[in-house]
Amino acid sequence: MLDVRRMQVLRAVVTTGSITAAATNLGYTPSAISQQVAGLEKQAGLPLLERVGRGVRPTAAGRLLTEHAARVAEQLAEAESALTALRQGCAGTLRVRYFATAGAALVPPAVAQFLAERSGVELDLKLTEPTDPFEELAAGRADVAITVLEPEEPAPAGMVARHLLADPFFAVLPRGHALSRKRVIDLGELAEEPWIFADFGATGPCKDLVVNACAGAGFTPKVVVESDDYATAQGFVAAGLGVTIIPRLGLGYAHPGVVLRKVRNPEPVRHIHVVYREEAAWNPAVVALAEALEKAARAS
């Protein structure tokens, strides 16, 4: 295999036309330069230089390797430049995973700020469920994820979790409902109501949070409809088919046929975090995106 360092030495000799001049430019002795060229000739299996008066000139093989050495030098310079940009968080690709309500409320303003400052970074944005991102992160298929973690629940080993915001749930009632006269309702007051489960899925932190909150209030919700999303759930509520509770970020659209009321005793709250691998903490782009998400959360 050809030695790249020796090829650059040959290039210096060919460019200057002299072993002595190349030695001066490179800070070597002429003897060291001659040894490098001799070693390269052995690897190539062909003579690379021929004497011309007091100088040297390349053979056909020498010209060929000199041309390749120039291209290698350009590629190495490009690689070093790309590495510098990546080290400074100004290049590369960040794979970001988020769930729907966080995507609507937090991701767009954070991405806009991030790209205004780091336009050289490409973002791969993909919607996923709140429980999925840890698998994506651990497998190296994602760099940054937004998910739900309870305050007492530690992030998985090897992960950094930064709290973005506490997102409280609100009771969603049909207009004219008896409880709509109250500004704040106890969760237990919904115990005898039919419930619309709003986009909680079969499992996951949001469904667990709601079920556990209801258990803390002494009841299990009587589910009559399982909806696919918050907007559809509000439609069922507006039709008088039941009640539900929806996190604040999921109420960007409020159906005209419903009323929203604060909940207490207990107040269900989901805690949204941005998460990334500990080994990615060196990357300024990852940190910058996390900070942009924190800013978006403060403004939400």
Image (tube, rainbow, N blue to C red):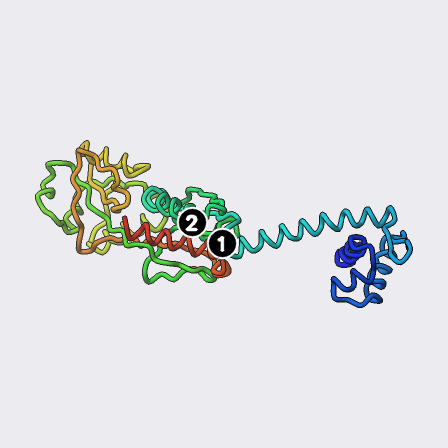
Point 49% across, 44% down: residue: 122
Badge 1 amino acid: Gly
Q: Is residue 282 left or right of residue 274?
A: right
Rendering quarter of residue 264: bottom left
Q: Position of residue 109 (x, y in %)?
A: 35, 45
Badge 2 amino acid: Glu
Q: Which mark is residue 203?
A: none
Q: Label 2's element?
A: helix
**Quarter the N terminus occupies:** bottom right
Q: Position of residue 49 (x, y in %)?
A: 87, 53
- Up-down relation of residue 29 to residue 205 (above or below): below
Q: Does the rendering let one see residue 211?
A: no
Point 11% across, 39% down: residue: 177
Q: Does the rendering let one see residue 297?
A: yes
> Which dot, 2 or 1, sits closer to the camera?
2
Q: Which mark is residue 117?
A: 2
Measured Cα–Cα span from mark 2 to mark 1: 10 Å
| 18 or 256, nearer to the observer | 18
Q: Residue furthest front?
A: 53
- Up-down relation of residue 268 to residue 36 (above or below): above
The residue carrying mark 1 is: 89
Q: Position of residue 150 (x, y in %)?
A: 33, 58
Label 2: how many residues lie within 10 Å, few (<14), some (14-19) or many (20+)?
few
Point 50% across, 46% down: residue: 120
Q: Tags 2 and 1 in contact by the CB under 8 Å rule?
A: no
Rendering quarter of residue 229: top left
Q: Label 1's element?
A: loop
Q: Is residue 266 left or right of residue 79?
A: left
Q: Earlier in the sequence, mark 2 or mark 1?
A: 1
Q: Position of residue 113 (x, y in %)?
A: 38, 47
| 152 or 2, nearer to the observer | 2
